[in-house]
């Protein structure tokens, strides 16, 4: 059997043999991690294989190979794997699910890794489509090095695999359909946020919910589409997609977005502040949604639980909020993100939900969602469950140093969607002390600072960096580098206080002036626009097209002793007034527009 490639494990590697099997599991169960053209995989057939069956499989094409392969696999077996001769191994057939279409391919491959050697049983007859059936060159140049790295890193994720609660094949089909259906929004997106990121992210979230709800209807024998309310709906695109796909619902947010008017009258969006209390219950709603809902995130399981015994919820946490302010870390052994997900899961559990965790496939680092589909108590026990909820919320309120009115404990009737406004004191606010987001959000991204103030800071820092190297005229002066703390030492305390107050700090100003500076690993450099790879990675700019509109002057042309290292036709910024055109884009950009 020809050997396709070979990579050696590092001497004294302590992660073997467990790391070996862990790496193989990634390729078997999550091939999309290495092959970006795949959506996922589903195991369609599986059976135990004994020594005789393995011999027969290998001897069909390669007599004499069986003992070599079996000895290697046995030597790499982890202590957790059985060593019985009768059935020590398993054979499986996987259904490979590509991203680009709905044609699924059943794939049964055999290639043996030997510390790590990649062998192919029949290379002359190897078929490759570059998607589900990879090319041999890709197996040796891409897959094998990744398997080696995974086997020796021995890293374990804090979270579950992506789409673990859904049938991946149904998700893949629906995602491609919705992506094609709503891709036109990218071209007409009126917000200042990145249209591709937010359109396709909301398409992915909508796909997840639609498949989740379809599975729920099938499990419970239901025909009616689930209703929903999206709390803190932001740009409203998720509401628009879910409504268009047949689910009755609405979105609520403290501030209207420009894109709302584009959706049409069928998409119901309300502009109002949401304050937890008796006026913020949804007894007739099936699902509450919190998609990057910020300060509302911990309240959503509570609001769902108090709305009705049948109300469910979905939250995708992003920013870290407690009930009455910013979330304060309590553990240092977990990442901040993992700790916050565990906190929201705890809120959900105390609120009475059987909580499930999953990981979405979206272009974001905050991809973990929590789902509450069922309760951990029966309807007659509602009063006791409410007492636990109220006590928990009150304990968080006390820890935050806020005193508020504790709500009365309600008693439920027989109806799952019964309105409970009469079970509490009219107008009582069990969210007393909660601070909703202001309608007009303060801009803290340097836009409110005077231009001459910002230009002065930029010029001072750049001159120091350029002065760190000698300018002998032989090459364009890139300057030296300083840590952010060293740069701070160049400025007066009053300047630093003003930066902290108005734009989040010195590092924010440096990053916002990415035309001049490159900030990497906590160090500040003068940007060299000749390095196209670094420039595109940091600023997402593409090469300048002929006749491109230039709306900002080139800092280097105006201030660098050797001027800009690029010719005017290759620079994205204007070399002189004759090269400058007025900008027609909006100047202000707020964080909240992203949600």
Image: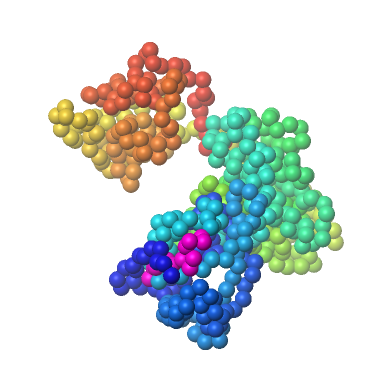
> What is the quadrant of the C terminus in the image?
top right
Q: Position of residue 406 (x, y in %)?
A: 67, 55
Above or below, comparing residue 65 to residue 167 in the picture: below
Q: Residue at x 78, y 59 (%)?
A: 218
Q: Residue at x 34, y 68 (%)?
A: 9
- Segment tinted magenta in the rendering: 115-126
In the image, is residue 283 part of the stretch drawn in magenta?
no
In the image, is residue 119 part of the stretch drawn in magenta?
yes
Above or below, comparing residue 492 to residue 344 in the picture: above
Residue sticking out furthest to the right: 414
Is 235 on the left or on the right of 284, as rendered?
Answer: left
Above or below, comparing residue 503 to residue 173 in the picture: above
Tell me if residue 102 can be seen. Answer: yes
Looking at this view, is 290 or 120 the one in front? Answer: 120
- Give the colour scheme shown: rainbow
Q: Position of residue 381 (x, y in %)?
A: 76, 67
Is 220 on the left or on the right of 571, as rendered?
Answer: right
Tell me if residue 253 can be seen. Answer: no
Q: Residue at x 64, y 31 (%)?
A: 259
Q: Position of residue 373 (x, y in %)?
A: 70, 60
């Amino acid at each position: 059997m020809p050997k396709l490639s070979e990579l050696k494990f590092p001497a004294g590697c302590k992660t073997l043999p467990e790391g070996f099997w862990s790496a193989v599991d990634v390729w078997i169960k999550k091939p999309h991690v290495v092959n970006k053209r795949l959506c996922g995989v589903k195991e369609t057939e599986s059976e135990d294989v004994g020594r005789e069956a393995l011999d027969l499989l290998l001897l069909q094409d390669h007599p004499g190979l069986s003992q070599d392969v079996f000895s290697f696999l046995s030597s790499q077996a982890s202590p957790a794997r059985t060593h019985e001769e009768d059935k020590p191994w398993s054979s499986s057939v996987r259904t490979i699910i590509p991203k680009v279409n709905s044609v699924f391919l059943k794939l049964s491959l055999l290639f043996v890794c030997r510390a790590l050697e990649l062998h192919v049983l029949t290379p002359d007859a190897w078929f490759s489509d570059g998607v589900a059936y990879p090319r041999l060159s890709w197996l040796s140049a891409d897959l094998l090095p990744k398997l080696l790295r995974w086997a020796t890193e021995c890293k374990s994720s804090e979270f579950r695999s992506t789409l673990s609660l859904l049938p991946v094949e149904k998700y893949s089909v629906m995602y491609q359909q919705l992506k094609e259906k709503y891709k036109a929004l990218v071209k007409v997106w009126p917000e200042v946020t990145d249209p591709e990121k937010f359109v396709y992210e909301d398409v992915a979230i909508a796909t997840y919910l639609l498949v989740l709800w379809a599975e729920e209807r099938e499990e419970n024998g239901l025909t009616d589409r689930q209703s929903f309310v999206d709390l803190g709906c932001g740009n409203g695109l998720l509401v628009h997609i879910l409504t268009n796909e047949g689910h009755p619902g609405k979105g609520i947010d403290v501030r209207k977005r420009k894109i709302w008017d584009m959706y049409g009258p069928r998409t119901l969006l309300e502009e109002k502040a949401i304050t937890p209390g008796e006026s913020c219950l949804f007894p007739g709603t099936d699902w509450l949604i919190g998609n990057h809902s910020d300060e509302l995130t911990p309240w959503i399981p509570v609001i769902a639980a108090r709305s009705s015994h049948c109300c469910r919820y979905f939250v995708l946490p992003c920013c870290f909020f407690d009930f009455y302010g910013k979330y304060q870390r309590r553990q240092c052994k977990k990442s901040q993100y993992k700790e916050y997900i565990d906190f929201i899961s705890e809120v959900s559990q105390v609120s009475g939900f059987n909580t499930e965790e999953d990981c979405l496939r979206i272009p974001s680092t905050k991809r973990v969602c929590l789902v509450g589909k069922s309760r951990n108590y029966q309807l007659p026990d509602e009063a006791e469950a409410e007492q636990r909820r109220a006590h928990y919320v009150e304990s968080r309120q006390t820890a935050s140093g806020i005193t508020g009115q504790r709500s009365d404990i309600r008693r439920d009737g027989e109806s799952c969607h019964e309105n409970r406004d009469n079970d509490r004191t009219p107008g009582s606010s069990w969210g007393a002390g909660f601070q909703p987001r202001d309608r007009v959000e303060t801009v803290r991204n340097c836009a409110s600072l005077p231009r001459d103030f910002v230009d002065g800071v930029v010029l001072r820092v750049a001159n120091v960096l350029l002065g760190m190297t000698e300018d002998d005229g032989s090459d364009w002066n890139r300057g030296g580098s300083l840590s952010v703390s060293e740069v701070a030492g160049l400025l007066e305390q009053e300047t630093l206080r003003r930066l902290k107050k108005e734009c989040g700090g010195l590092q924010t100003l440096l990053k916002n002036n990415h035309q001049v500076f490159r900030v990497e690993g906590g160090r500040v450099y003068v940007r060299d626009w000749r390095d196209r790879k670094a420039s595109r990675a940091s600023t997402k700019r593409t090469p300048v097209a002929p006749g491109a509109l230039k709306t900002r002057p080139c800092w280097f042309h105006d201030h660098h002793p050797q001027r800009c290292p690029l010719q005017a036709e290759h620079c994205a910024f204007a070399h002189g007034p004759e090269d400058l055109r007025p900008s027609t884009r909006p100047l202000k950009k707020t964080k909240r527009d992203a949600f």
